[in-house]
Amino acid sequence: MPIEFAQIPANWKQPLYWVELDPSMAGLPTNRQPILLVGQKLTAGKAALDVPIAIGTVAQAIDQFGRGSMLARMFAVLMENNVAHEMWGLPATDPVGGTQATGNITVTSPPTEAGSIHLYIAGQVVVVNVTATDTANQVASKINDAITAALDLPCVSNVVTGSLNQVALTCRWKGQSGNDIDLRDSYKGAVAGEKLPAGLVLTYANSGKFAGGAGTPNFTVPIANLSDEPYEYVALPYNDGTSIDAWSVEFGASDTGRWGWLRQQYGLVFLARRDTYSGQIVWGATNNDAVLTTMAIEVNAPSPVWDWAAAYAGKGARALANDPARPLQTLELAAILGAPKHMRFSITELNNLSGVGLATQRMGPNDLPQIQRETSMYRLNSLGQGDDAYELITTPATLARLIRNQRQAITSKFPRHKLADNGTRFGVGQKIVTPSIIKAELVAQYRIDEFNGLVENTKAFKDALTVERDPNDPNRVNVLYPPDLINQMRVFAVLAQFRLQFDRGVDNAIAA
């Protein structure tokens, strides 16, 4: 029988016209690529702890995680950078024995003129109007009232009993992440109309940073609850070693990891970390992971790391889903406040940060941070030698796309085939495949990938591609797949070899 049917029985004798459908030659690769935001919720949020939940709007995030929660804010920032992706939230349980971070504002001197205080808390502005006759205690009371009315802030406040010119602020959740809340005023400066009224002096404890928060969530249960659902882009606001190790294992290449041969799920994890240049250099050199990327931010950047991680993941997902091989440089991170001009990393410092496995950002012309280089945390090979195989996250993103394209082609076209040696003579339509047929299919798919800008050098690929039957298992095919990933234009170097005047002989030769 030259044509094999999967459904119509060979012994069917009833007339006349019977059809079965075969989609094996029609389908194109499709893949869900959800974004997962990891963070903490408040008790007012309805979502179950440690269980991922789909979120479609900021209002849903507020309802499920609580207004003013880390996760509600992360979704607000995410949706400023990406509105098209399928989005999920994973609310982790507060750390056992953890403490809440606190901050303090002291009204040291009252105003002598009326005006407005532009107070920035975790990068969110709160405007407080004062009069020329307000006392220090009255200003503190107004600051407290304004903070209390701003329900999306990550902290609550109260006027300190016995020191009525002081406002005490407390993070809404427990853990060291609360220490990343920044306090300041007049971020945009007088040129934008932001300055303290004359006479008014505000003092911020701990140089304007919250302090005293301790503990990080345990991710054993939350990660287990992800099961085998796809989560292509993860925003992780925790950069402590224990948290990074847990997510590195989940997204690793071991037998149990998402990049391993058994699960084949893939994905990238986006983080952010605040520190001095020296601290970033030391920390970066202690990590090594191909699918985790950490954005280095300055100490004096107002926006907290959870906002940065959400923006970085959102904008990265938006671009990589369209084209995983295209560089992310110059993409703006909306809803993020970067460090003031005189407190930013220099271009030399940014270059060195890239060298220790840290992604970099730089303020763009719209006064928004831009992705400068999407470096991964990978630095060393298995023997501890310097290696740039996975230096940029476009590399694993492109590999994931190629593997999925190949998997779709093979599983769609050869789902129930027999296997024979090259040169076997069989009838047209027989569900038989040979190594040469498989090789031809892989080359054809590679040409499509080349046309779509993912790879290059098809001829070299075809020459190096090896497809063979396993010598010890006649039912198994082994493939050596050597894609040449397309590269990116990241550096444009020019030697400007100028002259004050070309030699006359050269001019005459050109004229001739």
Image (cartoon, helix red, strand yellow):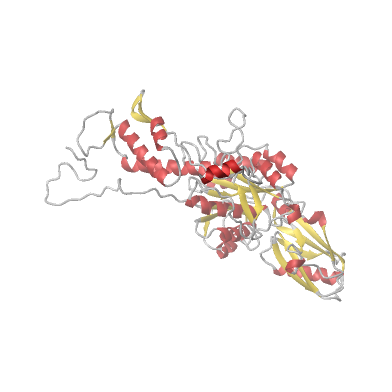
Look at the image and tell me whether residue 400 can be seen.
Answer: yes
Q: Going by the image, does 19 lie left or right of 303? A: left
- Residue 495 at x, y percent in the picture: 62, 42
**Which quadrant: the N terminus?**
top left
Give the quarter of the image for residue 291: top right
Give the quarter of the image for residue 493: top right
Q: Nearer the viewer, residue 276 or 463?
A: 463
Q: Going by the image, does 59 lie left or right of 99? A: left
Look at the image and tell me whether residue 51 can be seen.
Answer: no
Relative to 85, residue 134 above or below: below
Q: Nearer the viewer, residue 55 or 86?
A: 86
Q: Going by the image, does 352 lie left or right of 318? A: right
Relative to 333, residue 268 above or below: above
Q: Residue at x 45, y 44 (%)?
A: 454
Relative to 82, residue 401 above or below: above
Give the quarter of the image for residue 390: top right
Q: Nearer the viewer, residue 396 or 237?
A: 396
- Residue 468 at x, y percent in the picture: 35, 28
Q: Going by the image, does 191 lie left or right of 134? A: left
- Residue 34 at x, y percent in the picture: 50, 52
- Residue 118 at x, y percent in the picture: 75, 67
